[in-house]
Image (spheres, helix red, strand yellow):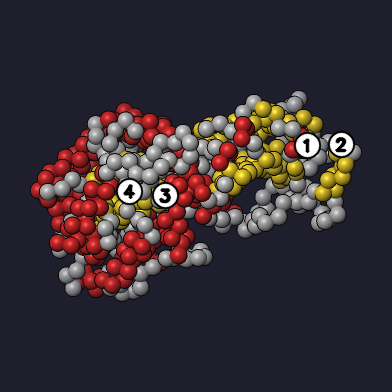
Amino acid sequence: MPAVAALTAGLALAAWAAGPGGAGPSSGACAPRGRARILYASDPSSVAANLMPDPATADDLRRWVDMLADSGVDLYDQEVYSQGWTAYWRSPKLEYDWRSQHRRFLPLLEAGTQPLSILIDQSHRRGMVFVAGFRMNDNHGLIAGRKGRGIARSFKEHPEWVLASPDPARPEMRSDCLDFSFEPVRNSLLDAMEELVGRFDVDGIELCFRDRAYFPDGAGRERGRLMTDLVRKARALLDRQGKAKGRKLLLGARVYDTLKECGDLGLDVPAWVSERLVDYLSPQDAMYSDFNAPYAEFAALTRESSCMLYPGMLPWSSLRARNRLANPLGPAEQRALAHTMYGAGADGISLYNHAVVMWNAPFYPQMLRTFRQLRDPARVAAGERHYVFDPTWAGQTLFGEDGRAATGSLKAARLSLDRSARRPRGEYRFNLYEDLGLAWGATLLLRGFGLTEDDDLAVRLNGRLVPDAAIRRTRAIGSPEDWTHVRRARGRALKTVPELGRVDLSRQPEPSFSTRWFELDRGSLRRGENVLQVELDRGDPRAADPIVIDELEVWVEPK
């Protein structure tokens, strides 16, 4: 490595490990530790397929790294291995990713230049830490198989190493994921890591556990010791290689966003932290940004250690937001989620799958520029925030009942009111780390599917009744278009029209809904978990459908 690049790489690692930097986002928050705030995780193919020309040149790769550095990224994680394939580098022992998006690098490779070396060198020149990502399993294996190749031949030759689907008619439930019960599977990952770290000047490795399974169903907790042994060996090889290189090499882990899911899958995250095996954790859902994820339970582990916490921020809040509404997170939603992460004890933010929406305006590189806000808790707290609590996996039935994720956990929070019951009631829990004394105002909105304008609700927030006069309402979506329509209540006529601005792209129209909203005062919220209680006080006699409240939003305008 050139002297300048070596110096900047060393400074970047020193900054990563430095003491607390920056104030917490609001009163009562833990100050984030270290100086690194933004971790950008790039999957094997999105940038290659959508940003790189064909053929790609060294300058194209350098320009991509410059985009990240110019946007305030501290740690760049490029995923370079999945299911026995390598990406951005070639190995005499492993298969190179055969997919078309990776063939654009063949001219460089055939000329003796490893694209990975260019990414690493330019990252160091720009002062970024570079970690090489290893997908410990990858649900794209089955997709590739349907295109004629599938997972690497070394794995395909041992079908017993591949997890069987619980339903043989639906192989996509496991998607050719590998079974880490087998020592050769575990050793294959370690061998690939050893080769990569020995050949390239990486600053560390990230183990990406974002896929569907690592052990047979129900065996994760009993066999998790095998995965912990793999993590120990990964730590040992990095320590060994780091000693030879004269610097510490990082080990990160991208895991599911609840400790229960991690444990069920065989990922003993508390042990990894307590044994000082990992230098950072990035808890996240496989696909969506869950504003209600329990980031604080991870912070309770990391704050007692030197392990940093960089929760994952993904482009959409839910399957519904992605497929029905085509609505990725905008800057106000990103600030809200970052505010929650910092408030729960995060040290920074990890952007994952961000490149998947690079064709949404304002496109790359402008879309990356919001990272400058996200890296600064004070700027996050100074900007308008829009919290979106919606049912993460509602509409997904591949893994059982509606809303069940691949991990087996139900991720579709909802409050349901059965009209046939007497005064039905329910509650919805949501996390906020807001001090409304620092805001000009805040509003809470809830959408009830099956709710009409003539349903009267008793609403309580953290046990306090919200006065009915403070709650506004809309007509149900699908009502006749009538801008003169009013609803009469307490001797007054109140303008009531359907909610505007929601665009549903699905061919199958969503159920009719009505919206309620009210302003929040300083004493209405708790720091952390809040409870919204809703009771059907007097139902619309013309309505028959149950009421399902599974969308809640909060807007905060800071002073």
The residue that appears at 42% across and 65% down in the rendered structure is 365
Residue 270 in percent (x, y) is at: 32, 31
Decide: marks 4, 1 in contact (CB < 8 A)?
no
Which badge, 4 or 1, is on the more N-terminal residue?
4
Residue located beneath label 4 in the image:
36
Q: Is residue 383 visible?
A: yes
Residue type for callout 1: Ala
- Asked if residue 63 is positioned above or below residue 169 in the image, the reply reads below
Residue type for callout 4: Ala
Of residues 242 and 528, the one drawn nearer to the viewer in this rendering:
528
Which badge, 2 or 3, is on the more N-terminal residue?
3
Separation (CA) of disc 3 from disc 1:
39 Å
Residue 21 in percent (x, y) is at: 34, 44
- Mark 1: few/some/many CA within 10 Å (<14, 14-19, 20+): few
- Asked if residue 332 is positioned above or below residue 448 in the image, the reply reads below
Residue located beneath label 3 in the image:
376
Q: Secondary structure at mark 2?
A: loop
Residue 141 in percent (x, y) is at: 35, 53
Which badge, 2 or 4, is on the more N-terminal residue?
4
Residue type for callout 2: Arg
Residue located beneath label 1 in the image:
469
Which badge, 3 or 4, is on the more N-terminal residue?
4
